[in-house]
Image (spheres, rainbow, N blue to C red):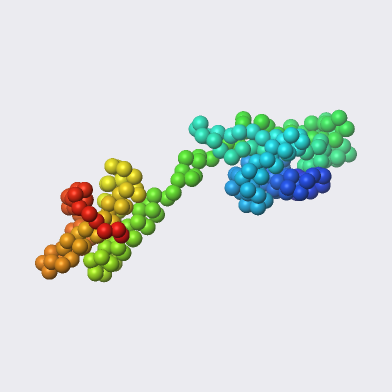
Amino acid sequence: MSVEATKWAWDTSLKPTLKLVLVALADHANTFGICWPSKKSMMSKTSLGSTALSNAVQELIKLGLIEREKRYFNGKRCSNLYRLKIELGTFNVRTPSERTDSVRTSNETLGTSGVPIVLYKEPSLNPQYKCKPVENLHKPNKRKLYKKYALEILALFNKKAHKGFKPTDANLKIITDRLKEFEKFGDLESSVKACRQVVVKMSRDWGEDEKMRGYLRPKTIFGKGNFSQYEGELGCTTVEKT
């Protein structure tokens, strides 16, 4: 966060909503007045909705207070980069008495008033401004999803078959393996639905048979090869809702 940038944002005369967004951007800004917050982060900071936030940013651009630049990583969009259009010499600078033109550093130059101005490299050419990989940013954690559904299916199995199998790694793995296997033929939701239907069908078909009731266990129902046969029989069988 740049204290100078935040002060500049607070001191700028604006409508409440516009000032709120400008202050939020300044709060994210580095010493060069540059930031690249996500829209979600900005919405959280300002308590504004997506449309209201976008309108405020557009208005700040029209007023010449900020600039916006699109960012990409491997051809995919990342969060936008923003430059605060702070007046010359208002932040991260030293006075002429503290710094002369002859001894200024490589990232400073003199403004028209003689005050040193900090320059910054073009963000698109500076590695520190490159986007981080975002391929999996919005994707759900598949491992957690598999475990969640495996636990639900095991609980349904225990309820329908009147069993008490514990959620051990072995029991959850064999169910997860079938979820992954049958997900290839559609999607995860369809795979979960098939597992639930097989549980209901087999519990009903074998539950009243004293001999077959002993085979009602995860290893039998969800065993590789067995499950595909039981699932194949669903097409010609009416299964109660789970």
Observer-nearest residue: 117 or 78?
78
Question: How far across and how far down the image is residue 71, in percent?
Answer: 58, 34
Specify the quadrant of the image occupied by residue 84. Answer: top right
Observer-nearest residue: 8 or 107?
8
Residue occupying image coordinates x 34% and y 60%? 152
Residue 170 in sight in this render: no
Question: How far across and how far down the image is residue 27, in percent?
Answer: 70, 48
Judged from this view, the residue extending furthest toward the left is 211
Specify the quadrant of the image occupied by residue 169. Answer: bottom left
Compared to residue 34, the image places residue 206 above or below, namely below
Residue 119 in sight in this render: yes
Q: Is 54 left, or right, of 137 in this rendering? A: right
Give the position of the C terminus as an image quadrant: bottom left
Q: Is 178 left, or right, of 129 in this rendering? A: left
Residue occupying image coordinates x 45% and y 45%? 139
Question: How far across and how far down the image is residue 22, in percent?
Answer: 73, 44
Observer-nearest residue: 145 or 56?
56
Compared to residue 62, the image places residue 215 above or below, namely below
Q: How many marks?
A: 0
Observer-nearest residue: 193 or 72?
193
Residue occupying image coordinates x 47% and y 40%? 135
Specify the quadrant of the image occupied by residue 203. Answer: bottom left
